[in-house]
Amino acid sequence: MDVDVRAINEKIEKESAFIDILTLEMNKVIVGQKQMIESLLIGLLGNGHILLEGVPGLAKTLAINTLSKAVQASFSRVQFTPDLLPADVVGTMIYNMKENDFMIKKGPIFANFVLADEINRAPAKVQSALLEAMQERQITIGDTTFKLDEPFLVMATQNPVEQEGTYPLPEAQVDRFMLKVVIDYPKLQDEQLIMRQNLSGEFATVNPVISVAQIIKARAVANEVYMDEKIEKYILDIIFATRYPEKYNLANLKDLINFGASPRGSINLAKAAKCYAFIKRRGYVIPEDVRAVVFDVLRHRIGITYEAEAENVTSVDIINAIINEIEVP
């Protein structure tokens, strides 16, 4: 198979021009947090959901809200609480006295961008309702099944600090998130700017700069980014090293890993690397693209043992050890 990388490169150079415009528009409101914005764009292009983790007040909700304003798309926000019911998210059947019949009232999940705020506060029932929407891109209310509009992106936030009244997300659900992004505090200069903006009360208005149709087209183009067989092998080596570390000269990790990444890990790592190359306006994937997204794609897909917890080893430490050991093509 002969691939014309130059032609793909030119096409991507042209098609990815909106990335700069979209980033500029988001930067009007969001100061710093470059990695968070990049992750949101990867989710948007890769058709994947994103889990944002960080202490309160780091503009997680603001970032998602800003993105939906910059894209001409519908946005809804669900504040997850322990008493939330599945019907509060997906909708329910309501009795209509006039018609003497039941009618369907759609819930907030029927939007292009759904912000699931503090997702770990809701019980398992609500989580499972959300799971159908995330995986199947459809919702069932009563006997009727509705297809969700494209793009459909769930961005969930969770607060790592509070344990009171929270429910840990089941592994199966965490695996449905393409990326898990851990957000840190802003830098000093950035925070100074945030403080000034808030005190002056002058907030920039975000204008819609891209349509839903453009995003769906950009997704197809991002999919065309060329990935060499060597890069595919590199991705698979990383994934397999999470499952069988002893085969990759990493026997010391064997007792620290409870379970490795599933095939969803390799699919999402390849997808995210392609989207990252697209954002960087390149028509082919290089190893640096894989390394740039590997932590966000895999940090929630590696289960660690009690032994690792006792030694204060996290999944990020394991990924670090793996990418330092595996040969870069």
Image (cartoon, grey):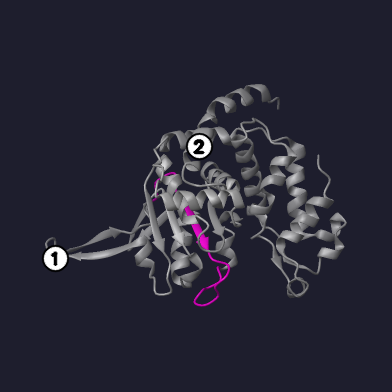
Residue denoted by label 2: 24
Quote the CA–CA distance across marks 1 and 2: 50 Å
Q: Is residue 138 visible?
A: yes
User: Dot 2: within a 10 Å radius of its alpha carbon, few (fewer than 14), some, or many (20 or more) residues?
Assistant: some
On the rendered image, what quadrant is the C terminus found in? Answer: top right
| Quarter of the view holding residue 176 | bottom right
Residue denoted by label 1: 97
Dot in front, 1 or 2: 2
Secondary structure under badge 1?
A: loop
Of labels 1 and 2, earlier in sequence is 2
On the rendered image, what quadrant is the N terminus found in? Answer: top right
| Quarter of the view holding residue 71 | top left
| Residue at the farthest left position | 98
* Amino acid type for the residue under numbered disc 1: Met
> Is 14 displayed left or right of 231 in the figure?
left
x and y percentages locating residue 317 in the rendered image:
75, 60
Please state the extent of the stretch shown in magenta in the rendering: 147-169
248 w.r.t. 129: above or below? above
> Is 252 displayed left or right of 32 in the figure?
right
Residue in front for this viewpoint, 137 or 52: 52
> Is 109 displayed left or right of 191 in the figure?
left
x and y percentages locating residue 9 in the rendered image:
63, 26
* Amino acid type for the residue under numbered disc 2: Leu
